[in-house]
Image (spheres, coloured by chain):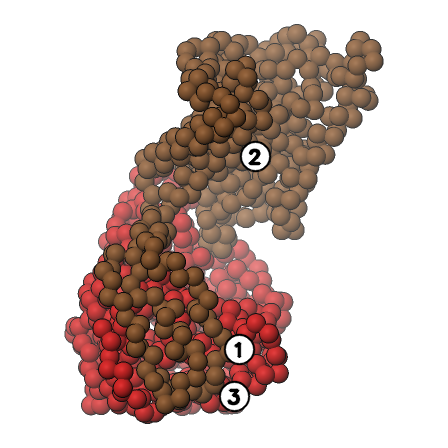
Chain colours: A brown, B red
Amino acid sequence: MTEPTHAPLHTVARGRARWHRIIVRPVLQRRARVAPAAQAIAFVIGIVLALIAGAMLLWGSGNDPATVYQRMAESSLGGFDALSRTLLRATPLAIAGLAVAVAGSMGLWNIGAEGQMMAGATVAAGFAMVAGDLPGPVLIVLMLVAGAVGGVVLVVGPALARAYLGVSEIITTLMLVEVAIRIVEWLKVGPWKDPESFGFAQISPLPDQASLPGLFGQVHIGVLFAAALLLAFWLAVSRTAWGYELRMAGSSPATARYAGISLQRKVLTALLLSGGLAGLAGAIELTGTATRLEPGLSSGYGFAGIIVAALALMRPSGVAVVAFVFGAVLRGGQSIQTLGVTSSIATILQAMILIGALVAAVLLNYRVRWVRPVGHPSEKSAPQAGPAPGGAPPSEGSSHPEASGV
Amino acid sequence: MSVPGDAAVSPGTGDGRVVVDLRGIRKEFPGVVACDGANLTVRAGTIHALLGENGAGKTSLVNVLGGVYLPDAGEIWVHGAQRQFHSPADAIAAGIGMVHQEFRLVPTLTVFENVVLGSAPRYLDMGQIIERVSHLAATYSLQIDPSRPVWQLSVGERQRVEILKALWRDADVLVLDEPTAVLTPAEAAALGLTLRSMADRGRSVIYISHKLDEVLSVCDEATVLRNGVTVAQPRSLVGIDRSDLAEMMVGEAAAAIQRPTDQPSGDVVLELAGISALSDRGLPALHAVDIDVRAGEIVGIAGVSGNGQRELAETIAGLRPTTAGTMQLAGVEVTGASPRARSRAGLAYVPEDRLGVGLAPTMSVVDNAVVRSYRSMRRRMMLDLQSCEDFCRRLIERFGVQVGRLHEPISALSGGNLQRLLLGRELTGEPKVLVAAQPTRGLDVAGIAAIQSQIVAQRAAGVGVLLISEDLDELLALSDRLIVMYEGQVAARMDPTQATRAEVGAAMAGTATA
């Protein structure tokens, strides 16, 4: 349009695909607010869509989706025994999820809850070896305390490094997972090896009185601990001055500092609490479901806790719901293997359901608008990109009065 | 739809050809209608001012033009053709260049690399590109060395890189969002020349600014928005003055606030003696600064941004450690004291960054209102939500904050309301000293008036006020004494009733003797 001051070397839009000139395009726009009810609905929709996709997977692998889904539902939700099996799995998930969420509510990521669970279980098992003569209730309570201590011990290094040196807690907590698991493996073949197991390497069994009392079906009393912890932390985070300071430090560190809140102390307490909770989850899993300490005891619950906390948006109330659903998915996925569904297909199915829920939660923050393009600017770049002697206006032929889709 | 194709464009202004025509643009965000039938007509070869109060919809409107937002309704016509921009790339391809308030540059790359980034020719001939970029810069009198890395550049130079980027993409419409907010007076003048030379070559500039004097001296035409609607489109600014423009913007003539003329004679409530401090990078930012503020007095701090004002405010608030010197607050030694101890000693602090330092963006209005007082609202371990809400309601009422719901995130509030809440929060509890950093920056006319009158009211109530501002008019109108900072030192102390803008400007540029 003007005398060309330079011949543009570029072709910004010349190569742009032309397909979206004819196709109605979806455009994602971020929502300012998301209603909590919508959150729940999206969660359900995501799971349903994943089940539909999963049906194709099952079909393709030679299974009847209807039968498989029926078994999944029945085995996890259908009746007292099924529910108890779901709750059995939801218990460690809820406590581990809460552990991650406590740190997450001030913007910290305790990725190593898995390791802290193992550390908690290890210290609890060690305590049972030393004080195995104590009466059941006393022993169990002390083992749970020992478990929390174990979790704290594993996280104290990352917490101090984060608070005083600014070292990312994501990396340090994650690396210590491996350390915790290897220590248990070493204990198994070394100092804690059961002398009565002859050549077979395993850790000595726990004393008989060191197992959590059952509640109903498969569920042990640990589910009540989980519920109490969720309630306590919900109150602490949303209703106390301590929780206010925690949320303030997470939302805006500079504001918190100005308000006289010690960020370092808050980072320390959040991470130590997180580790302690994960350790407690480990001890509850040990006393509730296991007869002895094993390297595979936490069986991924600590890592799953990250998903639980993220899906719950770091809110204790959400953790309860998500942990239950997650527990049902785990139980359902396990039960269908008796129908001949191979374990890899079952695992993929579980993963799809979780991804469905996750994607739905993310997409909920956006709304989709379908737009139909009017004249596409790529057409204009053609006359404009070349030098236009005489300054021919580039507007020729660039108008497309298609109806606007908006 | 298409303009007559035979109209050859002559260089220079005033051929009257419409380049950009926005018609009836509506853009709604949840709970807010930013634009509601806004029109903007920009002609080739003109510098077009886009005026309006904060929240009038200026930035939303140009973001629609720039492909950042899709409008809910309305039409975008560029060069006589209707367009729909799905992304900024679409708008760039249509010849719309945007220079946002926050620059979008890669600090580690050089100037020319930033300029050609994303539109580089397939086979890079560095020498040729540098030559072309230099030539382009020279054509529009943009002083810049194409081979310097961007991190070494000043803010003004970075802005030139942004303009070069737009020119490189052959933008015939350049949109600048408050371009002089970050510039020194000399840089602003140079920018004016560059824009004029663009207009002389037939390009158009859309110029968003709050500074009415600047608009009058730089721009040819204007569009005034009020509440998302275009209320005036003067085709010429000849014969129009400041108060005319202000009236179009607010609908009534805004009266400038003046401090009372009585002489303050209170005790010294804030005393800095030989204060030194380091910047975030660990370099000396304040050097042996002596400042004292008396009760019932407003001391203004002037200076080009980045000359230690931010560090000064943070040092007084206790957020930045001192390396030398002592500080007294209402007779209490507070050197090295915590922010909380200072606030208890009677310090109120309005930080430069309202959201992020003063207020926590994702927390609710109530949570933010009680930042200074939540400790007194504890009942055993629990926070008494009822008294928090009551406190917040009183604050909102007393300081005229407009809030939707008490428990919505504070970031939903507009700039003026954020500042009212923040200032109000700091002023409860009868402080002895108020340190306000850029308290009116980015606010609309009504918001500025509200904040300034609060500051004057605090002076009358016997509070010692340290007012740090980049708005020279504000400082000259409100201050009892004026201190100019340059490179972390007190460069000049002036009497605002005697000093001229030119003298203050010289001191800000470091050319006056202290």
Residue B469 seen: no
Which label belongs to residue A274? 2
Q: Image quarter for residue A109?
A: top right
* Viewer-closest of A285 and B398: A285
Assign a secondary structure to mark 3.
helix
Q: Residues within 10 Å of mark 3 (few under 14, many from 20)?
A: some
Q: CA distance from mark 2 to mark 3?
A: 60 Å
The residue sitting at 24% across, 82% down in the picture is: B4
Which label belongs to residue B239? none
Contact between labelled residues 3 and 1, with CB atoms less than 8 Å apart: no
Kindly identify which residue carries mark 3.
B135
Does residue B337 sit above or below A159 in this rendering? Answer: below
Q: Residues within 10 Å of mark 1 (few under 14, many from 20)?
A: few
Q: CA distance from mark 1 to mark 2?
A: 44 Å
The residue sitting at 49% across, 75% down in the picture is: A10
Residue A210 seen: yes
Marks 1, 2 in one chain? no
Assign a secondary structure to mark 2.
helix
Kindly identify which residue carries mark 1.
B154
Q: In the image, B340: left or right of B49?
A: right
Marks 2, 3 in one chain? no
Disc 1 marks a residue whose amino acid type is: Ser
Q: In the image, B6: left or right of A138?
A: left
Disc 2 marks a residue whose amino acid type is: Ser
Q: Position of residue A231 (x, y in %)?
A: 43, 27
Q: In the image, A47: left or right of B402?
A: right
Foreground label between 1 and 2: 1
Number of marks: 3
Disc 3 marks a residue whose amino acid type is: His
Contact between labelled residues 2 and 1, with CB atoms less than 8 Å apart: no
Foreground label between 2 and 3: 3
Q: Position of residue B166 (x, y in %)?
A: 44, 76
